[in-house]
Amino acid sequence: MNKQDVLGWIGRTRVVPVVRAGSAEEALQAVEALLEGGIDVLEITMTVPGAVEVVREVAARHGERALVGAGTVLDARTAEACVEAGARFVVSPALDEGTVKACLAMNVVSAPGALTPTEVVAAHRAGGDVVKVFPCDALGGASYLKSLKAPLPHIPLMPTGGATLQNLGAFLAAGAVAVGVGSNLVDLKLLREGRRDELVARARAFREAARQA
C-alpha cells in the first residue's frame, strides 16, 4: 500500500480515533469495538504500555480491513519501530523533523503536529503529508480551522482536540481531511463498566456523521 492509498483511506473514513489506554489489553478491546462500529482507521498512541506490540497485534489481526497508525510518536527511532510493526501512518503532537525524515525515507505517511499558521507551514515544508492541528479546540475548534484553511488551502489538515459527535460535521465542513477524536469517541470507561455495546454504538454514530458531513 503506497502513501496515496493510505491518504485516500483516511480521507474516506474521515474519523481517526485516538486510542489511549492503561494497558495493551484495554487498547485491543477498544480497537475491536471501534472496528465493529465501522471505523477502520486506528491511531494507537505510544502512551499505551507496550504500544509497538499493540500496533503489531492489530496489524496482524486486521491488516486487510483496518488502517493502523501510530500516535504520539516523538522521534525517528520510535517511528521506525512502529512501521516495522505494521503502522501505515505516523502521527506526532508536534513537529520533529527527524521523525518526518524517517517517514519520508520509509515512504510512510506522516502527520506532524502544529497549531499556529507558522507551525503549520513549517510542518508542511518539512515533508508532513497531513498536518495535525493540535490542540485545535484551544484556539476555537472548527472556526479556527476554517481561518487556517483560508490562506493555506493546499495543506491537508487533521484537527485533533475537542471533536464531538455534535461538531464533527463543522470540522469537516471547515476543510479537515479527517478529524482526530479522543475520549469523546474512545471512552474507555464504557469498556471498564461492561458497556462495550455503547462504545460500538458510538463508533457507528461517528462513522455515520462523517458520511453525512
Image (cartoon, helix red, strand yellow):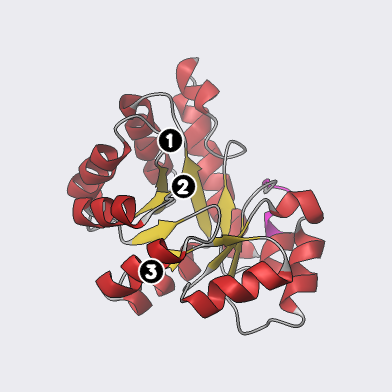
**Measured Cα–Cα span from mark 2 to mark 1:** 7 Å
- The kind of residue tagged 3 is Val
Q: Which residue is mark 2?
A: 72
The quadrant of the picture occupied by the N terminus is bottom left
Asked if disc 3 and disc 1 are in contact, CB closer than 8 Å, the reply is no
Report the amino acid beneath label 2: Thr
Main SS, magenta residues? loop
Residue at the image point whose x is 51% and y is 70% from the top: 130
- Tell me if residue 121 comes above or below residue 44 in the rendering: below
Q: Is residue 45 magenta?
A: no
Is residue 187 visible to us here?
yes
Q: Point out the stretch of residues depicted in magenta.
A: 164-169
State whether residue 192 is above or below residue 146.
Answer: above
Sequence-first tag of 3 and 1: 1
CB contact under 8 Å: marks 2 and 1: yes
What is the CA distance from the residue labelled 2 to the residue labelled 3? 14 Å
Q: Which residue is mark 1?
A: 47
Q: Which residue position holds label 3?
A: 109
Task: Name which quarter of the figure residue 22 lies in.
Answer: top left
Q: Residues within 10 Å of mark 3 (few under 14, many from 20)?
A: many
For marks 2 and 3, the one nearer the N-term is: 2
